[in-house]
Image: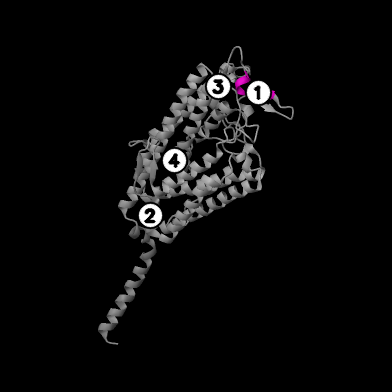
Amino acid sequence: MNISKLKQLLLALAIFPVLFSCKDDDAATVAVSEELKIDVVSNYSNIVYNTYLDSHTTAVELQTAITAFTATPTAEGLTDVQNLWLAARSPYGKTETFRFYDGPIDDANGPEGQLNAWPMDESYIDYIVSGDANTEVAGGIINNTTDYPELTKEIILGRNLQTSDESDVTAGYHAIEFLLWGQDLSLESAGQRAYTDYLTAEGSTNLNGDRRALYLNIVTEILVEDLAFLVDQWGEAGAYRTTFEAMDQIEAITKIITGVATLARGELAAERIAPGIDSEDQEDEHSCFSDNTHNDILENINGMFNVYKGAYTTVSGNKISGSSISEVTQKLDSTLANKIDASFTKLNVLAKSEIINPIDVAITTEDGKAKLEEIVAELRILSDLLVNLGPLLDVKISN
């Protein structure tokens, strides 16, 4: 071999390891531009803000109706308030994918535990119907005028989630739900609390209607305040949004994917659906008093889809859209992207048309449980597919 050819070969051998070693480490950088990463994070922040804003707006509408209802309780007024609670749950259900990465909703000081804590021991708040004799037990904070002669925000929040099993829930959507519907004692219908529980004179069906009304107003005020905090945190100049958009873009994208993957497997599949299948107990369904659990499941899936696709339609009909995790996935691995799309499509069909409603009926029949088990299995598949994005981004994604 002549000297010239030998030099060319040595040069090629020297360069080859460098090219090879850079290929995997820089794959994400090459495939996903800095501009795309920045746009994904910014669009996500906008979706979070607008979804929390809708949650707050609908909660304020609920609060206004509750104030009017408790001032003059009527059967029609109770129905109106129940419908507004159902409407308020829709946008909030979509927000639950914004959790699981120590954001403002569930960091050490976050309000998640007083927004959506569940399951709850109803007797911790109010009277319950108990035992085979179907007798009423007048207990709970509302009826305990000795230990709680006055009901205040501080007392209610001070009692929230105080025991080891965390069933002593005093605040949040489900506390309000219980106060509006009462216990669900039938497979055929939701809870049947009467508006007369809020009367204080002739026609009242239970003691302490005035305290029950006060409690309901206080916990609704807490709900509105907690949602307002989250709106502020994710606003255009909000404290957390500023921090989130300033962090390393891959770190922020990792948090986004972690929220979706963890809601799918660790929370929705494992904590909210599977326990009811195993126990066949309606107390283990998420919105057990109103029989709204099927919508909770659907809205959680919708929220995950919104984040993955980078799009959200507000309650008023405005469309928020931009760069997405879906685009990032397509650039990194189109086969993986297609599998994730197929999983979301299957989940959407299952949640919209396959669940036997209400869930307390579904968990007592073989066919109903089979449909729910199919959703659980698909949620696990989706979560694992999202975790596969980790190595492509050179990060670890938890679920």
Badge 4 is on which residue? Answer: 103
Label 3 is placed on what type of residue? Ala
Q: Nearer the viewer, mark 3 or mark 1?
A: 3
CA gap between label 2 and label 4 equals: 22 Å
Instruction: Tell whether 197 sits left or right of 229.
Output: right
Residue at the spot of label 2: 328
Work out whether mark 2 precedes mark 1 in sequence or the reverse, and give the earlier one.
Answer: 1
Q: CA distance from mark 4 to mark 1?
A: 36 Å
Number of numbered discs overlaid on the protein picture: 4
What kind of residue is marked 1?
Gly
Q: Is residue 142 magenta?
A: yes
Answer with mark 3 or mark 1, whichever residue precedes in sequence: 3
- Tell me where residue 38 appears, x and y as whole percent: 33, 48
Question: Of 374 and 263, which appears nearest the observer?
Answer: 374
- Mark 3 closeness class: few <14, some 14–19, many ≥20 residues within 10 Å: few
* Mark 2 residue type: Val
- Look at the numbered disc 4 and give the secondary structure of its residue: loop
Q: CA distance from mark 3 to mark 1?
A: 24 Å
Which residue in the structure is indicated by mark 1?
139
Magenta stretch: give its range: 136-144
Circle 4 packing at 10 Å, graded few (<14), some (14-19), many (20+), is: some
Tag shown at residue 75: 3
Instruction: Judge by depth and name the residue closer to the eye, 168 or 243.
Output: 168
Mark 4 or mark 3: which is in front?
3
Between circles 2 and 4, the one closer to the viewer is 2
Residue at (74% x, 30% y) in the render: 132
Q: Earlier in the sequence, mark 2 or mark 4?
A: 4
Viewer can see residue 399: no
Q: Kindly indicate whether the residue at mark 3 contacts the one at mark 4 (C-beta within 8 angstroms).
A: no
